[in-house]
Image (spheres, rainbow, N blue to C red):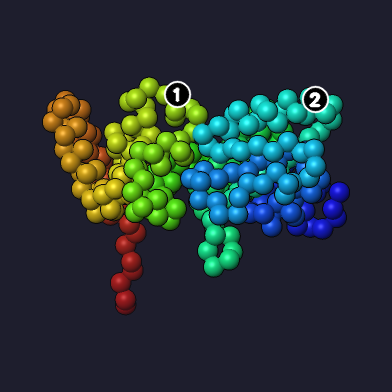
Amino acid sequence: MSSHPHAQSKYQVRFDWGLAGAAAVATDADVVVWVDVLATDAEGFDDETFPPGALALRGGTADAARVADAVLREQVRLGRRAWVAIIAAGARRDDAVRFCVEDLLGAGAVIDALAAVGLDYSSPEAAAACAAFTGLRSAVTHLATASASGQELAAAGVPLADIRAAAASEALREAPPHQRRAEWGLTRRGNVGALSASAELGSVGALSEHRRGRRASARRHPDAAAARRRAAAVISRCVQVMRLAVVKRRPQMPHDS
């Protein structure tokens, strides 16, 4: 087991980027999970790169739970703690690995799924990736289409629906159609839902779509719209009363003699 700090060797679940990252954190790993959500990897998933005898898996947001189950079965087979290296593939740019948000979130999804089955002794790097996924879980498909990799694929003619499908979580894939539309920002209201259409419409178009959606909702639900207007009026009156009360209680300043 390597003692170099970059090896993250004291942690059961480690995280790094690209083949160089795999060389740093996977030298003693029992399981290596390669995450390349949108298949932008230019380095290649090569079993020979990883330790002999290690279980090599592909994973991401789409199959995180299945990967976690496979890792847990391997740990049971070994009869001891399994050491797991999660490697985000990233993409190549100027002979270096380019950060890819979809791979960060995919790796975080796998780390989160591992924690759910009890493999939660994670390095700070792995914990940060997991937190990125859990914090942005509802926006994963939007971030994938709006990301540099997603826009690059879209410009090359790949349908946005295919990009969304590649980045969708298992729960989203299995959800009813109306829930999937909500996740993709097609029926949700509010800033997040409005902005999740920005990959297709641009931010200005997304906000216009959001406003049109609110107007359409008001037409469909006039009672709810009227109730919101009444509530706003009540709040406005309360604010005015509070301001008057503050003015009445304000102490008088003494006059100069």
Q: Quadrant of residue 148?
A: bottom left
Residue marked by disc 2:
77
Query: What amino acid type should be assigned to the residue bearing mark 1?
Result: Glu
Residue 8 visible in the displayed image: no
Query: What amino acid type should be assigned to the residue bearing mark 2?
Result: Arg
Mark 1 is surrounded, within 10 Å at the Cα level, by few (under 14), some (14 to 19) or many (20 or more) other residues, namely few
> Which quarter of the figure is the C terminus placed in?
bottom left
Label 2 SS: helix
Residue placed most toward the observer, 136 or 91:
91
Cα distance, mark 1 to mark 2? 30 Å
Residue placed most toward the observer, 223 or 144:
144
Mark 2 is surrounded, within 10 Å at the Cα level, by few (under 14), some (14 to 19) or many (20 or more) other residues, namely few
Residue 65 on image: x %, y %: 59, 29
Residue 216 visible in the displayed image: yes
| Comparing labels 1 and 2, the label whose residue is closer to the camera | 2
Q: Residue furthest bottom?
A: 257
Q: Quadrant of residue 184?
A: top left
Residue 52 on image: x %, y %: 80, 42
Residue 140 disc label: none
Label 1 SS: helix
Residue marked by disc 1:
174
Residue lying at 78% horizontally and 45% vertically, measured from the top left: 51
Q: Is residue 203 above or below residue 142?
A: below
Residue lying at 34% horizontally and 59% vertically, measured from the top left: 251
Residue 87 on image: x %, y %: 65, 47
Could you tell whether 114 is left or right of 183 in the image? right
Q: Is residue 119 above or below residue 108?
A: above
Residue 43 on image: x %, y %: 60, 54
Residue lying at 38% horizontally and 22% vertically, measured from the top left: 176
Point out the tag, 1 or 2, that comes first from the N-terminus: 2
